[in-house]
Amino acid sequence: MKALGPWVAEGVRSSLQRRLFGWLMLPLLVATPLLGIALYHQVQSSAQSWLDDGLEDTALTLAGQIDLRGGELRIDISATMDRALRFDRQDDVFYLVLGPRGEVMQGDAGLAEVQPQPRPQPAGDTYYGDVKLRGRELRLVQLGRDCGQGVCQILVAETLHKRDALQREIGGLVALNGLTLALLLALAGWWAIRQGLVPLTGLSAELERRDLHRLTPLTARLPRELVPLQAAFNRLFERLDRAAGAQREFLADAAHQLRTPLTSLQTEIELAMLEPHDQRVEPLLDRLRQRVVRSARLAQQLLSLARAEDRSVDVGAALDLRDIAIESGQDWAHRALPSGVDLGFELADAPALGHAFLLREALENLVHNAVSYAGAGARITVRCGSSAEGPWLEVEDNGPGIPPADRPAAMQRFRRGGQAAGTGSGLGLAIAADIAGRHGGRLELLDAHHGPGLRARLSLPPLPDPAPAA
């Protein structure tokens, strides 16, 4: 028991199932031997009593043969009866009949020398005991019987071969049955614990499906003992949802409040650059304009990020990614691209389900990322189409690209590739990846089709099969 305690407490902390099984087995391992010993003694006592009753029956038979004739006690035991009284396939049987004064009337006179010597029994009383006779162990029954002139003593004894064999058989059966019962109880306990922990497995699976974007309450039907735990999780989800909502609202409000003054400041700087001024401040004004443009872009990205995380936005509207790409192309046609940048479009029909504004923001970020990092003279191609896996948008450039080892990190917020040379904030790819995930799709960073470069592919789930006509 002392050895099992530390094993239960220390060795299986990683498994609730094994811990429960260990504490279940602890009383089983203690109780099974004790119950087995008690059962063994009860069965042995019953078997001993049955065998003693057989010896007493023999003694009663001998007592019935004592007769008083003409004032003299006699006992008539024929040779046939003597053989019947002594017959036993496993043990030697001895008997002795003593008169009221201790004289030998019939039987084995040596039986009177057994040790320890039993006392004479009153009429009607019986004594049972284990004795020895010339080094042999015997089981003895002594019966007192009123025979007219006093109390006669009838002694019947037998060796212990049959009793020893029966004792071993009882011990073996009790041990075998005890081990079988313990094994069955252990298996039943293990199965019961596994079944009892199934609701916890289901609760764990439900928790795995929750994140900051999906904090819906847990609704699984659980045992009464787990209902408070489920309620506690639901209250936690409610608090997290409120905190995440407040964070998104703050981010959206801050981005919105920053965007207007930054746009005004950019306009003022550009007007100042058009007015007559000292050419020595031209580089300073240009740097200020670039910083303001970058800040305005960052505010726009933060606003897009807040919208992408808004769970209330419906992303199930029917649209065509080709229209999204055309609108983005018309917007980029009015922008000043870096020197030598060639922006082209290869568009095909790509019906999908989603939110047009969010998908346009994703494409905007992918194109802006390519323009910012591909460098002067880059060739950028925007594609869209549909395949068996679903509709997709793709932006490919022939710039330096991103090494495969750095691509997972490049899609994290405020992380840029180790070889990035642009002035981005590290949010463009992260926003596109969030929008793709919000639509149930994914963003992949792949090698360009030909030569160096990067190909960012946004894939959406395929359209559901149309419902059959009624």
Image (spheres, rainbow, N blue to C red):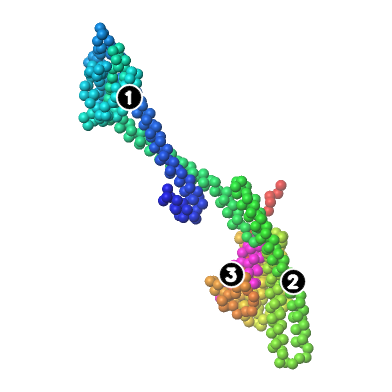
Magenta-span inclusion, residue 438 = yes
**Kind of residue sitting beneath label 3:** Leu
Question: How far from the left and from the top, in percent, is residue 327?
Answer: 72, 70
Quarter of the view holding residue 294: bottom right
Q: Which residues are magenta?
A: 427-451
Q: Earlier in the sequence, mark 2 or mark 1?
A: 1
Residue 82 visible to an observer of this rendering: no
Q: Is residue 215 above or below residue 141?
A: below
Q: Which mark is residue 149?
A: none
- Give the spatial CA distance, label 2 vs label 1: 108 Å
Dot 3, crowdedness within 10 Å: few (<14), some or many (≥20)? many
For mark 1, give the secondary structure: strand
Question: How far from the left and from the top, in percent, is residue 108?
Answer: 22, 21
Q: Is residue 134 above or below residue 404?
A: above
Q: Earlier in the sequence, mark 2 or mark 3?
A: 2
Which residue lies under the disc numbered 3?
445
Residue at 74 percent of width and 69 percent of height: 253
**Kind of residue sitting beneath label 2:** His
Which of the two marks, 3 or 1, is nearer to us in this view? 1
Dot 1, crowdedness within 10 Å: few (<14), some or many (≥20)? some
For mark 3, give the secondary structure: strand
Which residue lies under the disc numbered 1?
127
- Give the spatial CA distance, label 3 vs label 1: 99 Å
Which residue lies under the disc numbered 2?
256
Question: How far from the left and from the top, in percent, is residue 408?
Answer: 57, 69
Question: How far from the left and from the top, in percent, is residue 459?
Answer: 63, 64
Residue at 69 percent of width and 81 percent of height: 291
Quarter of the view holding residue 213: bottom right
Quarter of the view holding residue 78: top left
Magenta-span inclusion, residue 117 = no
